[in-house]
Image (cartoon, rainbow, N blue to C red):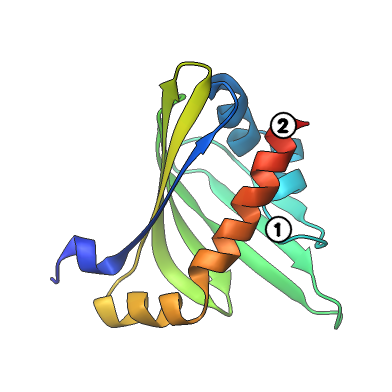
Amino acid sequence: MNNLENRTITIERTFNAALALVWEAWTQPEHIASWWAPNGMKLDIVEHNFTVGGTWKFSMPMPDGNEFISEGVYTEIIPQEKIVFTANFKPMTENVEIQVLFKANGDKTNFTFHVIHETEEYCRQQEAMGIYNGWGSAFDRLEGFLDS
């Protein structure tokens, strides 16, 4: 098994919002629908069973009439601290584990987002495809949502 660090993409942010609010934005389906997709895109929450072992499935209608499906299973939930889930973003990314860490920082929230890939090669390929921009854009929307 190769080194975890070489297979992980990490994005860190500090949101200008209280931990409870950031947690809600990540865990309430009506909030997730407001920021999870890139700017200008709509997101439909098909399934959202926010419990360990629960499945999630989101659908993003594309301009060409196709749907972009994101889905996975929640594997660990520590309230207001950590969410871990498997994820497939078909057809671009498959079989990754996502770890989302939250830490209160006064009235702000420190946020760490890890995407763990099966191999280092796959991780590099995802970087080249623009994974930082994709998630960065979603987190910009999350930031705007938290501010509103």
Disc 1 designates what residue?
37
Q: Which residue is more in the foreground, 147 or 45?
A: 147
**Extreme top residue here?**
106
Residue located 70% across and 49% down the image: 141
Looking at the rendered structure, the kind of residue marked 1 is Ala
Q: What residue does disc 2 label?
A: 147
Q: Quadrant of residue 59?
A: bottom right
Q: Tell me the amino acid under the disc marked 2.
A: Asp
Q: Position of residue 102 (x, y in %)?
A: 43, 32
x, y percent for residue 55 = 55, 49
Q: Is residue 145 left or right of residue 132?
A: right
Q: Nearer the viewer, residue 4 or 133?
A: 133
Does label 2 or label 1 sit earlier along the sequence?
1
Residue 147 appears in which quarter of the rendering?
A: top right
Q: CA distance from mark 2 to mark 1?
A: 17 Å
Q: Is residue 78 above or below residue 76?
A: above
Left/right placement of residue 119 relative to residue 15 reads left
